Structures are given as structure tokens and as C-alpha cells.
Amino acid sequence: MDTEQQLIERCQSGDKNAFSLLVRPHLQRAYSTALAILGAQHFAEDAVQNALLEAYKAIMEGRDICRFGGWLTHIVARWALDIARQKHRQQHTTEENELLEVRDDTASPITDVLQKEQRNELMTAIMRLNINQRTVIVMYYYQEMKIGEIANLLNIKEGTVKSRLHQARITLSKLVPIETAKQKVGECQ
């Protein structure tokens, strides 16, 4: 199996299949990032498509790329933010939330249903946050990015990232109380 660097080199030498092999393991995370920021499938697909074009162009121009997956996720997040800003300026409404499912095959059907319901509640609450808070929440918790990485990507200070995370947590705690979630789990066990 080729390493990412070998696949990048194959791309640069004209092997179009190598690009597909390079991005395939990272597509789901890229799409999840865009969907969580934008909340609409067609906008998320646009962000991923734009990011893939930008990534391909950068590879073909010989850009030095370390950790391709993380780099691609950063590009996707930047495109998603650009699209979100355009949506905001044009005052378009978004489609209903489309939630990504993470299945736990060891969970009982009741636990699985409860977890799905909690994820739905949480994602609905996250989508109600303003775009700045939603973005840092997604990057920090779902993409597991560090505060410094988020600050660099968004071109803001680390203190601003921390402030947005704090405000988002406060808002989310009001929208989805932790005790309510614990009670729902306790009732069905």
C-alpha cells in the first residue's frame, strides 16, 4: 500500500487514480466537517468539492503537504465557512438538519435509540448556535482540533476561540440540559 507521500508523487506524475486513492480515506471526515458547519447536504457537498479541487491543484503545483488528512479537513472547513458567510449575506434559509450516525454495534437496541435521540437533540442545538460558535464547537469536539489550530485556521486569537467555545457551551447547556439527557437514559435501563 502506498503512503500518502507516494500517492502525492504519483498524482504529480499524472496518475489520476492516485488522487482518488489519496482522498478516499478522508472523504467521510471532510464531509462530516462541512455538514456540521453548514447543516445542509448540498452546501456540504459544494464545500467538499471545492476543497478537493483546491487540494488537487495544490498537489499538481508541487506544494509540500504533510498530514494530508488534516490539511484536507482544514481546506474543507475554510470552504464551509466561506459558503456559510455567503449564505448569511444572501439570507438563504438552510434545509433541515441531516445528522451523521455513529453506530455502536455493542449497544442494545434501546440504548441505540436513546443515543440517537440524544445526538439528534445535541445536533439540533448545535445548529441553533450562531455560525462562529457552531464552527468552533464542530472543530474542537467533532474534529478534535486544538485551540491553536482553530485560531490559525480562522485567523483569530486563541482567546477568541476560547471565548466562543465558552459561550457555545453555555448556550448548549441551556438548550440541552445534561440532567434531562441522564434522566432519559436512566428511565429505559
Image: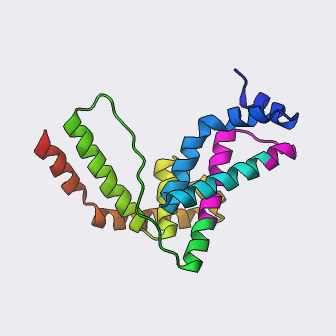
Asked if residue 132 lies left or right of residue 174, the reply is: right
Quarter location, residue 148: bottom right
Queried whether the magenta region covers residue 70, the answer comes back as yes
- Residue pictured at 35% horizontal, 68% vertical: 171
Residue at image position (79%, 36%) is 16
Give the extent of the magenta segment.
Answer: 57-82
**Vertical relation: 127 (above or below) 106:** below
Question: x%, y% of residue 178?
Answer: 25, 55
Residue 160 falls inside the magenta stretch: no
> At which x and y percent is residue 151?
61, 60
Is 82 displayed left or right of 106 in the figure? right
Q: Is residue 101 visible?
A: yes
The reply to whether residue 157 is visible in this rendering is no
**Image quadrant assignment for residue 82:** bottom right
Residue 69 percent coordinates (x, y): 64, 40
Residue at position x 28%, y 61% in the image: 176
Q: How is the image coloured?
A: rainbow
Report the number of numbered marks. Answer: 0
The C terminus - image quarter: top left
Horizontally, is 178 left or right of 12 in the view? left
Toward the left, the furthest residue is 187
Q: Is residue 14 left or right of residue 33?
A: right
Position of residue 169 relative to residue 182, above or below, is: below
* Looking at the image, residue 143 lies above or below residue 171: above
The one of 66 and 119 positioned closer to us in this rendering: 119
148 over 21 or under it: above or below:
below
Q: Quarter of the image for the N terminus: give it.
A: top right
* Magenta stretch, main secondary structure class: helix
Percent x, y of residue 33 = 54, 52
